[in-house]
Image (spheres, rainbow, N blue to C red):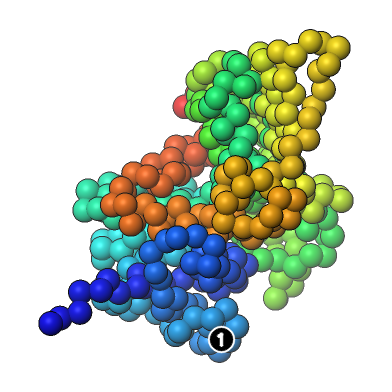
Amino acid sequence: MPDTTPRPLGVALIGYAFMGRAHSQAWRTVPAAFDVPETARKVIVGRDEQAVAEAARRLDWEEHATDWREVIARDDIDIVDICTPGFLHAEIAIAALEAGKHVLCEKPLANDTAEAEAMVEAARAATARGQVAALGFTYRRVPALALAKQFVDAGRLGTIRQAKAAYLQDWLVDAQAPMSWRLRKETAGSGALGDIGSHAIDQIQHLTGQQVRAVRGRLATMVPERPGDDGPEPVTVDDAAWANLELDGGAIASVEVSRMATGAKNSLRIELFGSEGALRFDLENPNELWFLDATAPVAEQGYSRVLVTEPEHPYLEAWWPQGHVLGWENAFTHQARDLLLAIRDGDEHRFSPDFAEGLALQRVLDAIIDSDAADGITITL
């Protein structure tokens, strides 16, 4: 009698650097934390044979390869996880979807709107075949931010009138910090705006449930050149960006992002202000959500700290006893969990954000760039 036991879902990871390490950790931990379909970490892919071989050993992948095209053609690969620089997203994702694979692609979706549109077309055809095309805005899976979304959806804030998001880092403060692919427009698309600004804008839209309808933006490149392999090299993307956003539900939002904010290591600060309450969050204290109930008597009002470690909180049923905090990497495990459940349940629309949401966000990013180029005028989407 033939063996009808389903085989593990084969995962291929494209990229082995910062995000590749984070995603590798997620694929290792997700089966221990959650009841999900079984997976096999089949192959990790990179251009440098020696480096990717070492990554496979260190990150616990069965194999390594240097040609992603050969990998996505394999019958034992079901999920393609893309952790490459943005300029490679479109080609790999489209090819993987056309090869019948489920795809998880790191944010932002693409380097420009034209690439993102092509990816969405491929995703539409793939979802019609039952495939999942998922976009990795991982901070949606931080338990405190998932709880914030529950507060908003339950009406605890009333009508949201104003939102603020600031994503600040300082890893480029030193003018002698070396050149990298993140500082070249041809590989990164944009600088702080696309890299971390995309997270800030995604959180504003996701938490409020409102979409950006108009923007006014400014960009700044504070260090115009960096040390390269062959001498000074021009920086062709922004170091920092600011934007005012008008949302279709009537709220106004402000966004500030920077890689030049001295003393800020990885601070994504989010504030929501509603008619009946307010919320605030900082990624440098990821287990805390602060909530103000404006329906309480004014003499009793003030922000209350919610330590998001209870089993009743989002994703926490899989982890540790109350008060035992989680870290930045756990959100990647939650992302893998949600992707695997979407595949298991046969609901290609279950995972959010999808490629279409990534395209909508790319249009916002492009509008901010266009606004800056036009001396800060308002751009309507």
Name the residue rendered at 62%, 67% in the picture: 18
Q: In this view, does 258 lie to the left or right of 100?
A: right
Residue 30, image x, y percentages: 51, 64
Residue 223, image x, y percentages: 78, 53
* Residue 192 is at least partly visible in this image: yes
Residue 176 drawn above or below residue 211: below
Name the residue rendered at 67%, 26% in the picture: 272
Residue 41, image x, y percentages: 44, 76
Q: Which of 299 and 134 is in front in this view?
A: 299
Q: What residue type is labelled 1?
A: Arg
Residue 284 drawn above or below residue 17: above
- Quarter where residue 215 is shown: top right
Read off the residue under disc 1: 57
Name the residue rendered at 61%, 47% in the picture: 311
Name the residue rendered at 45%, 60% in the picture: 35
Where is the N terminus found, in terms of image quarters?
Answer: bottom left
Residue 356, image x, y percentages: 38, 42
Residue 363 drawn above or below residue 212: below
Q: What element carries label 1?
A: helix
Q: In this view, does 108 lie to the left or right of 175?
A: left
- Count all numbered tags in the image, as a single digit: 1
